[in-house]
Amino acid sequence: MKKLTAAMVAVAGVAFAAAASAATLDDVKAKGHIQCGVSQGLPGFSNADDSGNWTGLDVDMCRAVAAAVFGDSNAVKFTPLSAKQRFTALASGEVDILSRNTTWTMTRDTQLGLNFAGVNYYDGQGMMVPTSLGVTSALELDGANICTNTGTTTELNITDYFRANGMSFNLVAFEKADEVVAAYDAGRCDVYTTDRSGLAAQRGKLTAPDSHMVLSEIISKEPLGPVVRQGDDQWFNIVRWSLNAMINAEEMGVSSANVNNLKFDGSITPAVARLIGKEGNFGEELGLSNDWAYNILMQVGNYAESYEANVTPLGLARGVNALWSDGGILYAAPIR
Amino acid sequence: MRTNSISSLIYDSKVRGYFFQTIILLALSASIWWLIDNTVTNLADRGKTVGFGFLGENAGFQISATLGTWLFDYNVGQSSYLDVYFIGITNTFLVAILGIAGATVLGFTIGIMRLSQNFIIRAFATVYVELLRNLPLLLQLFFWYFAVLRALPSKRDKIEIIPDAVAMNITGLYLPAPIVESGFMYTVIAFFIAIAMTFALRAWALKRQSETGQRFPVFWTAIGIIISLTTLTFWLSGSPMNWSFPEFKTTGAILRRGFQSGSGMVLVPEMLAVWLALTLYTAAFIAEIVRAGILAVAKGQTEAAYSIGMRPGMTLRLIVIPQALRVIIPPLTSQYLNLTKNSSLAVAIAYPELVSIFAGTALNQVGKEIEMIFMMMMVYLTFSIATAAFMNWFNARVKLVER
């Protein structure tokens, strides 16, 4: 009933949200913080510790926007959302940004009335199996029981993959990741499938993490990124350029360690000067102050810092998420 | 003296009534219009359209094999979202109906046990009620699901309940599946004819008793008629039914060992856990209702029955229970409605009911929140109103007839 009530409240929210709520920036400034939709606990991306502090790559995205808007990366409150609540929560205005390892797909852009502000992690769906199963390829999984989360792209991907390969399977779809892990751990399923980052993050929750292996097949493209409502271009730009600023800063070698020195350094390149607000008025064009990106870098850091603090401990190398100049596909439009 | 001036709005009770009711009606219509207009504007702002066209589109995701998928012959890529809706409804109703049946039987038993003269029976029932009704249902659901999962043998092992026919492991309870052939219809017809005959028999027996005072063993005769007529027809029409037994393999690739899909019938552990949790939880409430109902019948009724020579069993059946039912039925109806609505919690443990697959998976693919939540609410509303209507009819039948 709880979930049902939440959904109905969300519907009512769509009905009641004032028609003129387009200017998210004004609303956010009026309430003094950003409401950020995150996962219910995915280590490395959005996870709360014992004292309720949220950390992770997706959390840093929201902190960056808060730093850009308020000059304070702590001016953000988090709403843990299940996969199926998330879009309704965003559409109804319950959250201002959805930064919850959410895959960018065409349907979500068109039918759901959302806008993806960019990609902060390139992922792909993978499968984990117990090593005792003796399986080395996903093509040997005909007839398997598969556990996953409901309300995500994973249900469709796995169905597509098995259909394309003429294999049958039985799907057991839970609402929350914790139950998926518990059921897989108990042996209800032969396979646990989700994004590979998720597999790496959840693996630590298994009783014997070493007796499970991730199969080499990557069965889908999962570009994960922050999402905003359609129809508010200014807010969309703020989120998009907060992400771009973090990626550009890594490329330029600007980090939380040196950004303060660079501000008083006369010999910086014009690109760095534009980034940290010494040249031009890019911040004002966004409706913010010109030190917006400086605040992000000072308080949150660049993309590499966030990645190394949050994702590297899971054992996930940069891989495709390295900068384009380092052989990856991370490429941000220039600030100019 | 009547006046048509403006003061009649205050002093003429009839005019005043109409005046204020009109204002309230206008205000209500304006709010509703504002709400609808706001919704439409907001949806348009976000580039979303309103409509039920999505129901014809094909659903591209797999659904766990359950009664619903079997009944509607679910095929990924060929079945529509409307099929998903019906599968969700079927699975919701399945646990609701099974839960209502289970909770009623268990609840009546525990309720009567609470009034037992035997201390152990009474204490057991009290502990049961206090424990089960005071723990949140969602926790019980998780407890039963994971307790059941952990207790069962792995997928490649089994516990046999009836050798080669009924067995269980972590993937579910396996039963033989009936495979019906063409001539089976006659047996079904014979069964219904037999039931009609027992009603006729009962009417005849009652009439004879009121005329002659002689009693007739209706119950046992009825059982005899139903069994013999059905079995005879089944046998005469050439036994048109076979059983598909669950097949268990212990050789071959490790993944493919265990029960083979397509053989026998499986009840998934998610469904068993939901049924168990709903039954045990609601039974605790029903037990209290039953106890209250029985205690509400004055002691003098029992004493009067004994004084005219009735035995205890007969007293309970003919004197106490009919009167207790008058107290029991209305709150019992509420429990049935609660159980149905509580079944939506099953989404937490992967049972593919309405909230899970339609308002969950399908909603996520289609994004028509308002239409889909509305359709879902209509299902719960319809089912609850139908249950309430039936119970009200039953209540009217058992209530005290005043002469």
Image: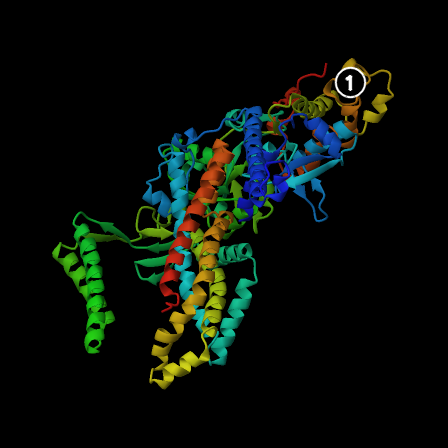
Instruction: Specify the quadrant of the image occupied by residue B391.
Output: bottom left
Which sits in the foreground, B329 or A25?
B329
**Could you say where residue B39 lies in the image, as x and y percent from the top left?**
56, 31
Position of B346 with respect to A248 (left or right) is left
Q: Is residue A89 visible?
A: no
Which sits in the foreground, A108 or B261?
A108
Position of B272 with respect to A60 (left or right) is left
Q: Residue at x 41, y 79 (%)?
A: B301
**Could you say where residue B260 lies in the image, as x and y percent from the top left?**
34, 48
Mark 1 nearby-residue class (10 Å; few <14, some 14–19, many ≥20)? many
Instruction: Specify the quadrant of the image occupied by residue A319.
Output: top right
Q: Indicate the chain on which mark 1 is placed.
A: A
The amino acid type, in three-letter code, at marker 1 is Val
Farthest residue, direction front: B1
Which sits in the foreground, B180 or B221?
B221
**Could you say where residue A9 lies in the image, as x and y percent from the top left?**
58, 41
Position of B99 with respect to A325 (left or right) is left
- Disc 1: which residue: A272
Secondary structure under the numbered disc 1 in the rendered image: helix
Q: Quadrant of the N terminus of chain B?
A: top right
Position of B110 with respect to B223 (left or right) is right
The relative height of residue A114 versus residue A86 in the rendered view (above or below) is above
Q: Residue at x 72, y 27 (%)?
A: A26
Q: Residue at x 32, y 40 (%)?
A: B73
The relative height of residue B282 versus residue A178 in the rendered view (above or below) is below
